[in-house]
Image: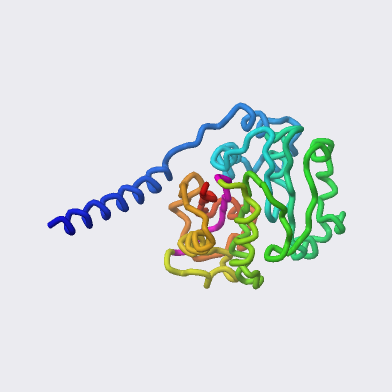
Amino acid sequence: MKKTMKRTLLMGALFTSLLTVQAQAHTDSKISADIQAAVNSKARVERQTKRDARRKPAEVMAILGVKPGMKILDLTSGGGYYTEILSRVVGDKGQVIAHNPPFVVNRFAAYFTDEKNGWPAQLNAPQWKKNVVKMVGELDTADFGVQIDAVLMVLFYHDTVWQGVNRQMMNQHIYNAIKPGGTYLIIDHSAKPGNGTKDTGTHHRIDKQTVIDELTAVGFELTLDSDILSNPKDTRDYSFERDVRTNRDNTDRMVLKFVKPVI
């Protein structure tokens, strides 16, 4: 009877833990004044701000936990939508590493006119010069340094699959670079449950459970599965590229917050 009771208690604790993560999916992180001011900045360009309604940058920054003075790695930062906001939040005492892999720089060479540094020349603004470091490197071999407070990867994890990136090595490098207690936030287009990685090269989507399994395999703990960018109407059977103007920010997107445990 004691063994049965012990087993029941263990199962109860596990169930409670799972419920906690699920409940957090509907819990909004507090948006600080620094984050709101960064998002509301009049200096942000219109082609970025017009995407805010569907990207909810203030909520995303709150989940990431960005604060003044932090060191943040913006992985596959692309055109700098989040880099711009992060730069304003961390302030003069903080730092943002705006990273892009060679694939992105080469494919969008016309956009990344400063190809040597993988830097959108049109975004080489005074704000960026204050605290943003340019970086180009392969995701599975780049040296991201150490003591990073938080890492953000938006709408690119699925690309690492069809591009042949060693994801275990990539995630291990990121894990090693982040401070204990630091955050790794992944946002991506959701595939149908159970589809694993098979939609990555066609529909540009990935199964959420696959991402969770790969991140926890290197030591990260999932602390939040947020539904702030979910879209129940998304059938998940097409690529946003079918009509990038209407679907790019309108897919059902996972928002997964992982934390490096404090040992």
On screen, residue 121 above or below 115: above
Judge left or right: residue 201 versus residue 44: left
- Nearer the observer, 21 or 8: 8
Name the quarter where the N terminus is drawn.
bottom left
- Nearer the observer, 9 or 131: 9
- Nearer the observer, 5 or 168: 5
Whether residue 186 appears in magenta in the rendering, the answer is: yes
Residue 250 point in image, percent of width and height:
55, 51
Q: Which residue sits at x=18%, y=59%?
A: 3
- Which quarter of the figure has residue 117? bottom right
Q: Which residue sits at x=65%, y=60%?
A: 173
Residue 191 point in image, percent of width and height:
49, 63
* Residue most extreme to the top: 33
Judge left or right: residue 6 versus residue 260: left
Residue 64 point in image, percent of width and height:
57, 42
Judge left or right: residue 63 versus residue 51: left
Instruction: Count how many numbered circles sit on residues in the image.
Output: 0
Whether residue 115 appears in magenta in the rendering, the answer is: no
Residue 195 point in image, percent of width and height:
46, 69
On screen, residue 218 above or below 30: below
On screen, residue 212 above or below 55: below
Q: Which residue sits at x=50%, y=63%?
A: 217
Range drawn in magenta? 181-192
* Residue most extreme to the left: 1
Q: Which residue sits at x=52%, y=55%?
A: 220
On screen, residue 88 above or below 186: above
Secondary structure mostly seen in the magenta stretch: strand
Q: How is the image coloured?
A: rainbow
